[in-house]
Amino acid sequence: MKPKYERILLKVSGEALAGNLGYGIDSSVLDGISKEVKEVVSAGVEVAIVIGGGNIFRGLAAAAAGMERASADYMGMLATVLNALAFQNVLEQNGVSTRVQSSIEMKQLAEGYIRRKAVRHLEKKRVVIFAGGTGNPYFSTDTAAVLRAMEIGAQVVLKGTRVDGLYDKDPLRYPDAKRFSEITFLEVIEKDLKAMDSTAVTLCMDNGLPLTIFNIAQKGNFYRILLGEPIGTTISQSRRSTPVVMVS
């Protein structure tokens, strides 16, 4: 079956890379995600990736603890570079040609971010990992993911997390939490749901860029989404069916 999309951007949360460790990088999780990416690339889909840094350092939390916000955010950007280099290494061990582009210049480790060069890499079926967020403090990696997706002409943003979609409240804390199968960007904003930060959601809404949130730890989910299967939660300008599904 032909994939639904030709070019996508995968946003992987730093917390997803930590797996059950709670901190750092779980090598088994990273290897599993890399194999999922390889399967998608082998199907002819062009894949760009943005990785968070929350498994190593969270700028907002550090700022809340008293650190100056801009400095804390720059430290968080460096954490995303560490994750990107680890991801690149494992992808290439699995036979996937990969390039890391950083919004913060560090020539010995990664290419600088150049949009046209990134697109050329994608056209050559290389996976491009965007590190360093937007390169500016006060912007999350969610916002960086949406921004890069629009710049490279991605057809969708897929956000891989440790949960199987977007809920009306934290499913890890509330057993009666309800999962949305489909929902609009406006509903996400009005209900103050934590799909992505408000800047990222607004960017998606203003530019008509659909977003899907799914559990990347479940084997096969990434590829099944690209085949059009209803995995996770789809967020778009309008929905076609009842948005709330009771959690089993």
Image: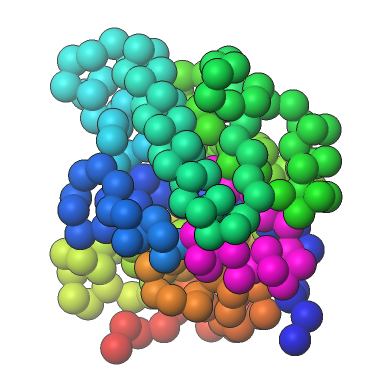
Q: What residue is shown at x 68% (from left), y 64% (from top)?
A: 41
Q: For residue 58, which quarter of the picture?
A: top left
Magenta span covers which residues? 34-52
Taking the image as shown, residue 128 lies to the left or right of residue 173, namely right
Q: What residue is shown at x 41% (from left), y 18% (from top)?
A: 74
Q: Is residue 50 magenta?
A: yes
Assign the N terminus to one quadrant of the image.
bottom right
Whether 133 is drawn above or below 213: the answer is: above
**Colouring used for the render:** rainbow
Taking the image as shown, residue 67 lies to the left or right of residue 37, namely left
Taking the image as shown, residue 175 lies to the left or right of residue 110, namely left
Report the front residue among 184 and 137: 137
Q: Is residue 157 visible?
A: no
Q: Position of residue 171 (x, y in %)?
A: 25, 68
Whether 239 is drawn above or below 1: the answer is: above
Whether 2 is drawn above or below 237: the answer is: below
Q: For residue 42, which quarter of the picture?
A: bottom right
Q: Is residue 69 magenta?
A: no
Assign the C terminus to one quadrant of the image.
bottom left
Q: What residue is shown at x 40% (from left), y 74% (from top)?
A: 218
Report the front residue among 8 and 187: 8
